[in-house]
Amino acid sequence: MQDYSFKAGTAQVDITPPLGTVINGEFTSRYANHIADPLYAKAMVMQDDSTTLLILVVDICVMQRDFLDEVKALILAKTGIPKENQLISSTHTHSAGSVADLLMGHVDWGYRKKLPAWLVEAALKAQQRLVPAQIAYGWFDEPRHMVCRRYRMKAGYRPFNPVSGGVDAIKTNPFGDEGDIIERTSKPDTELRYLAVKGTNDQWIGLLANYSLHYVGDCERGTISADYFGWFANELTELLGAGPGFVGMMSNGTSGEVNIWDFLEPDRYPAGNHAKSRLIGKELAGSVAASLAAVTWEAQPLLGSRYDEITVGLRKPTPAELESAKELVRQTDYENIHFDQQGYRQVYAREQVLLAEYPDQKQVPVQAFRIGSGMIGALPGEFFAETGLNIKAGRPDKKYFTICLANDYVGYVPPVHELEQGGYECWRCRSSHLAENSEELLKNSLEAQINSL
């Protein structure tokens, strides 16, 4: 049997933006006035005799295709790693510099121009640190920090839809209306799965975890923070007693409708800035460290990859809807908007006008990596837990997870039956605009890639 050589290396580069940087991830732009903890670009490079793979996890809300295509070209030029073998994802912290427009949260062009060089540096350093290595997959179930944020409400409650002006079947995050809740609408993916990497000398190299928790967001609007993703990495490094070359990485799974704002048990977490992030990050790290005793190490894992660009349609306003939206935009002072029902109608009217300029179709990247006996999938938006659970069902060995917000940001991609119910994640806009069949199409494409590997 042929003897394959496997090596791995990791690196992290500080990408913390300066004070004053634009922060996106909410309905309006925010500006950094406090830096709570550093942000990083974290790279893991793996190589066997014929294939090199890069996984790059970035402490940022979202990165879109136009930005990432530039980054991937630079990484290719510096490292020789093919673009289709580069998996670059956002953690989805909502407390980071902005390189993409989201609703009325705008791009910080100064930060956007600086970030590519830092991402390239992380990839290059990881490649330069390649050493003979081994891998292991692990997992555990942690349901305590997972809450579906979409709710069915009592008869008579009318969830407002600012796009249609009508009423939705469900309500996302019913602040102040907790007494009208009947039930949550979906089941989160409560497993944390991970890929652990050590040198053949038993020294830690890195660990890539995946958990389907949207983000925590327990800090003030102007704060820069890596959220629970950062707390997890720091605690894990300490618990493992790993050296300075170790890089702990937490990636975002299928978390589109999942957060920790529990409207049925609102007081079950500590209050205060970063208290929930700290608690969740440390608990998850502790469980990872405890579970490592049960993993099986693979000394010569084979690598493989698949990458496709899938053509999908877009949901766009009709001519009549567009004219109505334009009229509302003409009447709106967006510098002084108030976030009541009328304010949300104004925000989404602007979204319809901007979305109308989009093409009728787009190319959406789907990617899968084989790493030894396991697989990692990559999808480019905010997918619901149902999508991840369906894909995982085909991999009962627990050696698979889906990294979302990867290689592009195409917004929310709900299953068609969730789109029919409405709710924030389904309101048509630039961050929720793929055609109704897109979730099934992209899920099936990823499953085909996994099967082919």
Image (spheres, rainbow, N blue to C red):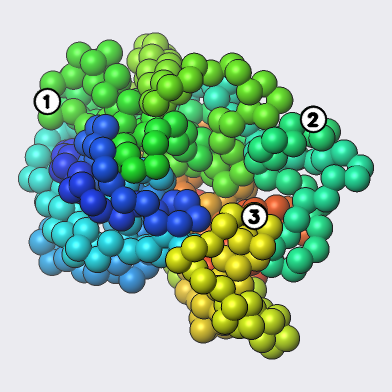
Q: CA distance from mark 3 to mark 1?
A: 49 Å
Which residue: 24% across, 66% down? 109
Residue of label 3: 340
Q: Mark 1: few, some, or many residues within 10 Å (few <14, many ≥20)?
A: few
Residue of label 2: 179
Outermost residue, left side? 128
Cβ atoms at labels 1 and 2 below 8 Å apart: no
Q: Earlier in the sequence, mark 1 or mark 2?
A: 2
Secondary structure of the residue carrying tag 2 is helix
Q: Position of residue 241 (x, y in %)?
A: 20, 14
Secondary structure of the residue carrying tag 3 is loop
Q: Position of residue 269 (x, y in %)?
A: 53, 18
Q: Which numbered disc, 2 or 3, marks the residue closer to the eye?
A: 3
Q: Position of residue 403 (x, y in %)?
A: 44, 46
Q: Is 230 or 139 nearer to us in this picture? A: 230
Q: Is 398 or 187 nearer to us in this picture? A: 187
Residue of label 1: 244
Three-letter residue code for mark 2: Gly
